[in-house]
Amino acid sequence: MSKKNILVGQSGGPTSVINASLYGVVSAGMAHADRVDKVIGMVNGIEGFLQGKTTVLSDIPADELKLLQTTPAAYLGSCRYKLPEDLDDPVFPELFAKFEEMNIGYFFYCGGNDSMDTVSKLSRYGAKIGSDIRCMGVPKTIDNDLIITDHCPGYGSAAKYVATTIRQVALDAVVYDKKFVTIIEVMGRHAGWLTASAVLARKFEGDNPKLIYMPETDFTMEQFFADLDRCMAQEKSVVVAVSEGIHDKDGTFICEYARQDVAVDNFGHKQLTGTAAYLADAVSAHYPGIKVRGIELSLTQRCGVTNGSATDMEEATQVGSLAVEEAMKGETGKMIAFIREPGSEYKITYQPVDVNEVCNEEKPFPAEWINAEGNDILQGYIDYALPLIQGNTPVVYEDGLPKFIYRK
Amino acid sequence: MSKKNILVGQSGGPTSVINASLYGVVSAGMAHADRVDKVIGMVNGIEGFLQGKTTVLSDIPADELKLLQTTPAAYLGSCRYKLPEDLDDPVFPELFAKFEEMNIGYFFYCGGNDSMDTVSKLSRYGAKIGSDIRCMGVPKTIDNDLIITDHCPGYGSAAKYVATTIRQVALDAVVYDKKFVTIIEVMGRHAGWLTASAVLARKFEGDNPKLIYMPETDFTMEQFFADLDRCMAQEKSVVVAVSEGIHDKDGTFICEYARQDVAVDNFGHKQLTGTAAYLADAVSAHYPGIKVRGIELSLTQRCGVTNGSATDMEEATQVGSLAVEEAMKGETGKMIAFIREPGSEYKITYQPVDVNEVCNEEKPFPAEWINAEGNDILQGYIDYALPLIQGNTPVVYEDGLPKFIYRK
């Protein structure tokens, strides 16, 4: 069997552990020295690849490569590029001609729903033309909204960041003997998985965050103020977690009431900002004289590897390695999914699943994990999420700060 | 010698290590069992004390007490209460009568400039009436703006948080192959000490943050856009750090252009928010089509002990213990200051200094550490600050999240 090269890319929003998956792909790929020549990275995903931007990963010295495991964001750069629906589009032969030219035998793409859509199209086009290139999906998303898999790499670290930060802010917010409302905005457009992790910050019954609002339920200002009335009667300091994607019953995002100029990205997703700021202003107006602060966790929640989960990092690495192993066995058009074994002890097995079943679907947050009032998260979620945030990512420090690997 | 009680309080903005100083006071106080009966905490500082709110700290079990060292915010609660300038005000005899009643022999107050003002007034009133109560100041402030002392407990951890977070955000901000401006707002009204720590995030020549704006220089939008033009010609992703307190040549805070309803706290400090948001909007308008994000680090920077400095935590503990030791020696009206020994190796000694010299003064950020263009921080600061962020705070984890101590 002649040696082939591996091509690997990253796509969509970065996470704290997408580079751990890249490390898994590169290290597992290099271990197949009998079948693999080089591991080549696409720079800025399929979009950058089409512009000829690549870098050789298998040349990186081992000690430097190891830093990938604990470096957040996307080492290779990312993109939000959607391949055409029509497999007769000329971009497909163009891509496969490039693959041929570069002697690619294996293609790995790490990302969320949209990235799995890319893997789906490439594997379907590959099948159509009889290519033997194996195309595999490596899941990642802080949104945790891929279906079939129990959870997604990247989620545990983001959840741990959110819960850690809210637990710390809740302590800070209680120091003055004054009424104080703190509103913390968490990422997640349509699925509230990451917002739900705010509940993990709660240390004792009645602890903050007192209220958690998810995009799975309709949000009303009336209910919000009624909830705040009740909480403020009990506690001086009320911390509220909200999803950036909370919306009214007509589907209008709450932040849209503040901003009419909401931008739309290439996939038609609305770019949202300002939910916490909008609500903080509304609370200030509703309760004159009360101290109010809106905090948007923003980019920090998806790159905060220094508050990341070791479990997440290890699983992210595994999922990259296993994608390589499955491709070596002949699999294509598959994504590695996590299957959680039943029982009280946390145990994960890995399984390749058809990427066509995964792409362009979103796993909803279970309705039974949200309370009837739509302002809190229940124990079922806590049992689900706690195993995912165990252990601290073993970030390497140099001169007092985290040491990362940078693309030259 | 009959036994006396210790009274200790916290005041002003919380930090990641103000409780480490409290731990220092409590543990050192309890070690003087021959002279100290109980260590009593004022709840919500002098303001809460006047309302009769106290808690006994020397009853806390040792293993729980130890958690104080790594618990952020203010365990005892804080206040922003200013004692009257006039020592003939009836609040002073009222306070000293309470001290008498509670058999207080030693008074410790942990805070910044305003808290040292409280220590100054109490020690001066005490001298006036011939009280033998010893009043000592324990410094803390993330603003690092107390004079005489080399630096302040709380600063190292906040600086490490800011630098760590910006380094991580800078990696995230570069993943897309698109022009992207990220503006990160750091706390610090008048002194840019904490904003300056953004420079520590820079890993290599030309790395982000490309621009750092301090309140020590006048800010103009013209210069800002000229700086951005130059940086955006070099790099796709430009990360900018700004102090919340940047202002124009007339002293008007930049964020005031966005908000006319700027609130004022009890000390007459303006409450500032929205500088990053204001600048992000301005950049969006100036460079149409460019991706822009404003991130306000907000409360997270002063309570982010999971990104805290072990050096800071150890020094904060020391400063609390040494305040007790000095009081036992008979000192009063003093604050424990850090003196940095000359030489390339970092070595700190501790010295009691007259609190009257410290209070109500602000240590300016050295002009020679800001570049001529007023948009960057120079090596002198880096040499000063790096020793302060060494080591990671040994936070205790339980079930995947930091374990803190809570006041019952």
Image: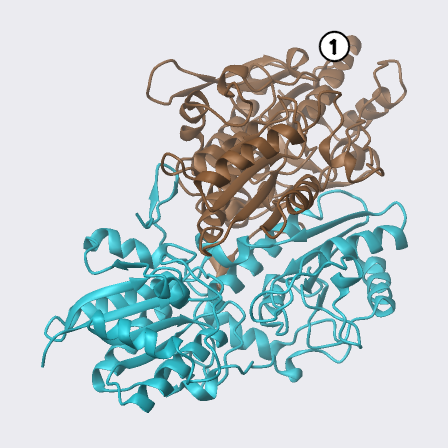
Chain colours: A brown, B cyan
Which residue is rendered at x = 26% and y = 56% of the image?
A: B66
Quarter location, residue B376: bottom right
Residue B165 in sight from this viewpoint: yes
Relative placement, left or right, of B210 versus A307 is: right
The number of numbered badges drawn on the structure is 1
Name the residue nearer the viewer: A304 or B155. B155
Name the residue nearer the viewer: A378 or A70. A378
**A245 relative to B370, above or below:** above
Q: Measuring from the top left, give residue A140's x and y in whole percent.
A: 60, 29
Question: Which residue, given by chain and number where applicable, does mark 1 sit on?
Answer: A127
Q: Quadrant of the N terminus of chain B?
A: bottom left
Q: Amino acid at mark 1?
A: Ala
Relative placement, left or right, of B311 versus A92 is: left
Relative placement, left or right, of B383 versus A349 is: right
Q: Measuring from the top left, give residue B351's x and y in whole percent.
A: 35, 85
Which residue is rendered at x = 87% and y = 68% of the image?
A: B222
**A49 relative to B202, above or below:** above
Q: Chain of mark 1?
A: A
Mark 1 Cα within 10 Å, few/some/many (few <14, many 20+)? some
Quarter location, residue B129: bottom left
**A361 relative to B351, above or below:** above
Q: Measuring from the top left, give residue B188's x and y in whole percent.
A: 61, 67
